[in-house]
């Protein structure tokens, strides 16, 4: 299902960026809904039938990040402040990727997302969905949502730094 969600990304982008009616924006929101449902069902099925794989554990968050990134980039064409959030997303995910690779080199990995990472992902998804679903929203309201998400994402990035520092301490114990 991760592949399917990745394949939905260009479909969303074409529909959203080419939208010239409320119907088009709702179609784009429908693509996001389908992606979300397949993500949810994929996880449920994998857990229920014990089909969890290492590749699936890798692909699922990659599909999430690509989907969120694509939606945010598309929204940046409509909402100028979204560009700051996109830049922060790149910084945060870049940091997470680099630290993850460094830790893998030392045969360590972060044991799942932390609660603040889940809050960040959930709030980001909620903000993105609201902005896609309500294209007529006042710019001021959209800016407030975007700024709140910037604060949440900044806090999340800051909170992950000591998590990776703790992991670094375990390298020295080897």
Image (cartoon, helix red, strand yellow):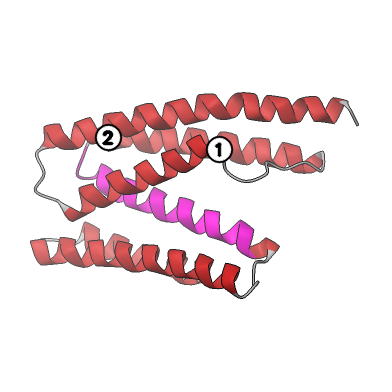
| Residues in magenta, as a range | 56-79
Q: Is residue 149 visible?
A: yes
Image quadrant where one finds the C terminus: top right
Please name the residue shown 22% across and 49% down the image.
Answer: 130
Q: Which residue is mark 1?
A: 94
Mark 2 residue crowding within 10 angstroms, few (<14) / some (14–19) / many (20+): many
Mark 2 or mark 1, whichever is nearer to me? 2
Judged from this view, the residue extending furthest toward the front is 48
Mark 2 and mark 1 in contact? Answer it, CB < 8 Å. Answer: no
Judged from this view, the residue extending furthest toward the bottom is 49
Q: From what the image shows, is residue 101 above or below residue 65?
A: above
Return the x and y of residue 47 as percentages of the image width and height: 59, 67
Q: From what the image shows, is residue 154 above or below residue 107?
A: above
Q: Is residue 12 left or right of residue 174?
A: left
Return the x and y of residue 157 as percentages of the image width and height: 51, 29
Q: Which residue is mark 2?
A: 146
Please name the residue shown 69% across and 61% down the image.
Answer: 54
Please name the residue shown 44% across and 64% down the image.
Answer: 40
Q: Secondary structure at mark 1?
A: helix
State the image quarter where residue 137 is shown: top left
Please name the residue shown 53% across and 73% down the image.
Answer: 45
């Amino acid at each position: 299902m991760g592949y399917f969600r990745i394949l939905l990304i260009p479909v969303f982008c074409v529909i959203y960026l080419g939208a010239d009616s409320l119907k088009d924006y709702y179609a784009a929101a429908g693509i996001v809904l389908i992606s979300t449902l397949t993500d949810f069902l994929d996880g449920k099925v994998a857990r229920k039938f014990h089909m969890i794989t290492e590749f699936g554990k890798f692909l699922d968050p990659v599909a999430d990040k690509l989907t969120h990134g694509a939606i945010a980039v598309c929204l940046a064409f409509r909402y100028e402040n979204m560009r700051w959030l996109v830049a922060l997303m790149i910084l945060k995910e870049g940091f997470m990727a680099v630290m993850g690779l460094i830790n893998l080199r030392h045969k360590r990995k972060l044991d799942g997302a932390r609660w603040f990472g889940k809050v960040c992902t959930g709030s980001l998804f909620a903000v993105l969905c609201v902005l896609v679903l309500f294209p007529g929203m006042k710019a001021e309201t959209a800016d407030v949502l975007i700024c709140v998400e910037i604060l949440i994402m900044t806090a999340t990035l800051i909170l992950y730094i000591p998590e990776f520092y703790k992991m670094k301490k375990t390298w020295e114990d080897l």
